[in-house]
Amino acid sequence: RLFINYLPDGEGGHDAFTEGIARSQSIQYIGIDNLSNDGFTSIIRALHSLSQLEELYIGGGNNVGPDGWYELRILLESGVCKLKQLRLEGNNYIGNEGMDVL
């Protein structure tokens, strides 16, 4: 289980963190909250290599833009992750981009 509550932007922090996620094959649950669009997008891109991922929680504190939702859509359509649950709690401002993914 991995819960990411904050990931600072800049200085290559996203790259180092997401490389670690991409190398892990045993993560079954990831929670994401309080991330910028860049952080969210980076994390979602890293999830493409996690074939064991079963649950993804996206909290309402994220600032997700169109490219972030697009990356989530690509992930869900790829069939790589065998998600059993996608939890979108508190995402009151999901916008049209997020709704298109769903």
Image: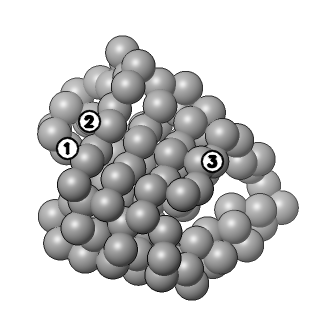
Amino acid bearing label 3: Ile
Residue at image position (63%, 77%) is: 19
- Give the residue at mark 1: 101
Give the mark, 3 or 2, whose residue is nearer the N terminus.
3
- For mark 2, give the secondary structure: helix
CA–CA distance between discs 3 and 2?
22 Å
Q: Label 2: few (<14), some or many (≥20) within 10 Å?
A: some
Residue 59 x/y as whole percent: 47, 31
User: Given the current orientation, which residue lies at the most extreme top position?
Assistant: 92
Residue 70 x/y as whole percent: 30, 52
Kindly identify which numbered label has been placed on residue 97.
2
- Give the residue at mark 3: 4
Residue depth check, mark 1 versus mark 2: number of the one nearer the observer: 1
Q: Name the foreground residue: 39 vs 82.
A: 82
Residue 14 x/y as whole percent: 68, 62
Disc 1 and disc 3 in contact, CB within 8 angstroms:
no
Amino acid bearing label 1: Val
Residue depth check, mark 3 versus mark 2: number of the one nearer the observer: 3
